[in-house]
Amino acid sequence: MEDLIISGKKYKSRLILGTGKYKSFEETAKAIKAAEVQIVTVAVRRVNVTNPKEPMLVDFLDPKKITYLPNTAGCYTAEEALRTLRLARDAGGWNLVKLEVLGDKETLYPNMIETIEALKVLKKENFEVMVYSSDDPILCKQLEDMGAAAIMPLGSLIGSGRGIQNRFNISIIKTQSKVPVIVDAGIGCASDAAIAMELGCDGVLINTAVAEAKNPILMAEAMKDAGVQIDVVLEIDVPDQDIISRMSGRRVHTASGRTYHVHFNPPKVEGKDDVTGEDLIQRDDDREETVRKRLEVYHAQTRQLVDYYGKWAASGSSGAPRYRKISGQGAVDAISERVLEALR
């Protein structure tokens, strides 16, 4: 396979990983190494790259050996995005950046009007800009014409893990583009990444699917080797109320990315980070009302995928996977044992 070329620089790997949501910088570094990626995104507003008095990402990932791609995650206006990327360039000399301007806190869908306004200014200031965008082919072509270094259409909503929802549009975007097209957001498993590559895309960007996996290192390796044939489908059944309890109980230390849970992994002092003593926050996407809405979407749209695999397995047709269903309730060790037993 030919090298991926972005702004004149060649990369062997076509997988880009985010550095947020991991339990620690050490785990981040291990996942990056396992996936053998050469580019990582860094949310400048959330990941510490400037304060030497606290753990810094650069202590674990050498920016001389891997390309840092500062991004504007958490920005909702062009002005916020511009301020963030100027800070990144001042702090680390980074000129290649990822622009994302979000429309709202619930869906994290891109605000393309603000995105276009920010891109105009960034190009005047000689940034090389990879742009997170909607999957609208007309807008994506406009971004390229404005000088975007790469187009990064969403596969589905950030953190949803629902894969590529509009394959036809992604195919059009790739066909019309002369710059790299990298699917960003919504990649939930290795097969999603494989689909993106089958559509002709130049790469994929993944964060949540790896960082929030039970074993981020193994998931990173799976993404690297995307395209493995499905031979077993395992459904882990968890009641909605348990899911709500698990997700709404999560708390995060923004600067370091350390995560806690009010019941299963509580901090030593309620509401405070164990290392710095700073306040923990509950992310908007972990709030109960948000989790309930995501479950509604799952039951309305994604649940049918479980039924599809179940029927396929029952058909006995050539190439059909085995289908197993286990309970996802109880201790981690007990669930792990059920998984291993189901896969034997």
Image: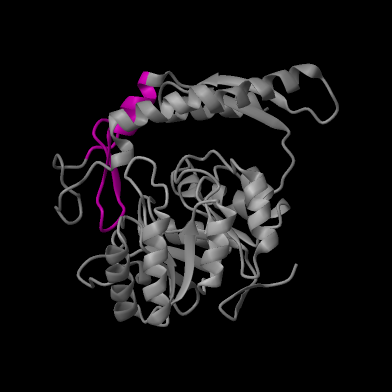
Number of marks in the rendered image: 0
**Residues drawn in magenta:** 241-266
- In the image, residue 124 lies at what x, y percent? 40, 81
Is 108 or 32 nearer to us in this picture? 108
- In the image, residue 327 lies at what x, y percent? 50, 19
32 within the magenta span: no
Tell me which corner region of the image, top left, top right, bottom left or bottom right, holds residue 191. Answer: top right
Tell me which corner region of the image, top left, top right, bottom left or bottom right, holds residue 320. Answer: top right
Q: How is the image coloured?
A: one colour
As drawn, 39 above or below 255 = below
As drawn, 173 above or below 247 = below
Is 324 or 19 nearer to us in this picture? 19
Please state, as top left, top right, bottom left or bottom right, where the C terminus lies in the image: top right
Is residue 82 visible in the rendered image? The answer is yes
Please state, as top left, top right, bottom left or bottom right, where the N terminus lies in the image: bottom right
- In the image, residue 288 lies at what x, y percent? 29, 29
Residue visible at 36% across and 57% down?
73
- In the image, residue 47 lies at what x, y percent? 31, 61
As drawn, 176 above or below 190 = below
Residue visible at 51% across and 66% down?
143
Tell me which corner region of the image, top left, top right, bottom left or bottom right, holds residue 55. Answer: bottom left
Residue visible at 38% across and 28% down?
293
Is 319 or 341 nearer to us in this picture? 319
261 within the magenta span: yes
Residue 316 lies left or right of residue 25; in this view the side is right
Residue 336 lies left or right of residue 344; in this view the side is left
For this orientation, the residue located farthest to the right is 318
Residue 320 lies left or right of residue 273; in this view the side is right
Is residue 34 visible in the rendered image? The answer is no
